[in-house]
Image (cartoon, rainbow, N blue to C red):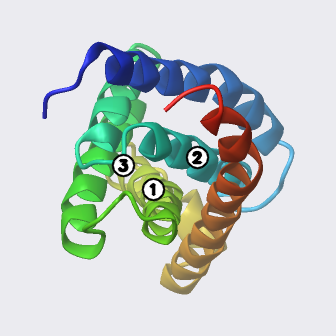
Amino acid sequence: MKFDVREIAAIALVAALTIVVGFVFYTAGNLLPVPGNKFLMFGPFLGFMIAMALWKVPRHGTVLAVNGVFALIMVNISAFMGLAIALTGIFWELLSLILFRDLKKKRIRMGAAALYPALSFFFAFLVSHYMTGNVLFLMVGGPLTLGTLMVVIFLLGLAGAFLGERFIVPRLEGITR
């Protein structure tokens, strides 16, 4: 995985925007009384951000690089958060190598971007439950609720990726590429 200077700048920009704007969604997510509430807010946003990274640098390794920067910064806030983010990036890359071959195709890029928030939710749940002992989710829901929320978050991520590809990319295509 070797990136040129423009690609490194794009990766750093996406990681920085994910952290800064993500803080707003994190705060807003506290207002919803639903298990996985933050990821219901994060779903469209993360799908949008990953779609933008893949639009700018459409190859495998891009999301892992964005995710690596994101995890390194967030581990300073919480080691568990950093671990969940790192696991998400690693598993996303492994799954995308199997499921999504050509990231230059718009539909494939959008599906790949939508997978990221669903995996983020899954690994945040695993780390929260198994590493910190948080059993609140299991009292409220269970495996069916976890699966349902992952599907809903995937669809929200797909909506975010679609909106990014539909409205932002055409405006940026004239400026960069």
Q: Residue at x 42, y 63 (%)?
A: 112
Query: Please, is residue 174 above or below residue 4 in the view?
Result: below
Look at the picture and state if 117 lies above or below 66.
Answer: below
Residue type beneath disc 3? Val
The residue furthest front is 174
Q: Are marks 2 and 1 in contact (CB under 8 Å)?
A: yes
Q: Amino acid at mark 1?
A: Tyr
Corner quadrant of residue 129: bottom left
Q: Position of residue 135 (x, y in %)?
A: 50, 59
Residue 46: mark? 2
Secondary structure, mark 1, is helix
Q: Position of residue 45 (x, y in %)?
A: 67, 45
> Secondary structure beneath disc 3?
helix
Viewer-side residue, 40 vs 12: 12
How many residues crowd mark 3 within 10 Å: few (<14), some (14–19), many (20+)?
some
Residue under the image location 48 percent in, 51 percent down? 134
Q: Quadrant of the N terminus?
A: top left
Marks 3 and 1 sit apart, C-alpha to C-alpha, by 16 Å
Q: Residue furthest right?
A: 31
Residue designated by label 3: 127
Residue found farthest to the left: 1
Instruction: Answer yes or no: is residue 91 visible.
Output: yes
Q: Earlier in the sequence, mark 3 or mark 2?
A: 2
Name the outermost residue toward the bottom: 144
